[in-house]
Image: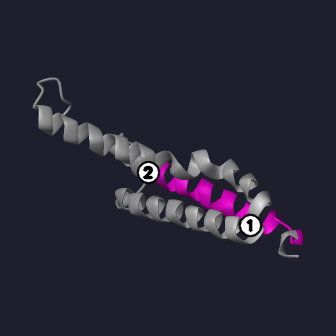
């Protein structure tokens, strides 16, 4: 009987969190590219990661409550996980740079 409830509110929350996570990461990393909006702009990066974790929480709650109707919430996946994947890639690249001690590294 629980599956008859509308998915719309969870979908709106999911998309809102995904867009907010992507937007705050874009603003935070824009600071690193030289685009300055305000002084503490880089502090938004942990906020972006927190919003991504929140999006994952909403997805897990939807899978538990709605089961087969929850894949619609995956629409926000690219926006929600873009910056965490980028940060992991960047951290791995820095680690490889330090481990191999190459001359062509950007550090």
Give 41 or 88, whichever is nearer the viewer: 88
As drawn, 78 above or below 24: above
Q: Is residue 97 visible?
A: yes
Query: Which residue is under mark 1?
Result: 10
Q: Which mark is residue 84?
A: 2
Tell which circle, 2 or 1, labels the residue nearer the N-terminal end.
1
Q: Residue furthest bottom?
A: 1
The total number of labels drawn is 2
Residue 58 x %, y %: 63, 67
Where does the magenta region start and end?
4-26
- The C terminus is located in which quarter? top left
Residue 101 is left or right of residue 33, and the answer is left
Residue 4 x %, y %: 89, 70
Residue 69 x %, y %: 79, 59
Give 68 or 101, whichever is nearer the viewer: 68
Residue 1 falls in image quadrant: bottom right
Other-residue count near label 2 (Cα within 10 Å), few / some / many at <14 / 14–19 / ≥20? many
Q: Which mark is residue 94?
A: none
């Amino acid at each position: 009987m629980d599956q008859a409830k509308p998915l719309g509110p969870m979908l709106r929350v999911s998309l809102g969190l995904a867009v907010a996570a992507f937007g705050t990461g874009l603003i935070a990393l824009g600071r690193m590219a030289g685009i300055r909006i305000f002084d503490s702009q880089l502090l938004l990066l942990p906020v972006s990661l927190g919003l991504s974790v929140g999006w994952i929480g909403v997805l897990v709650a939807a899978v538990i409550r709605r089961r087969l109707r929850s894949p619609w919430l995956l629409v926000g996946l690219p926006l929600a996980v873009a910056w965490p994947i980028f940060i992991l890639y960047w951290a791995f690249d820095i680690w490889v740079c330090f481990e191999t001690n190459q001359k062509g590294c950007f550090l």
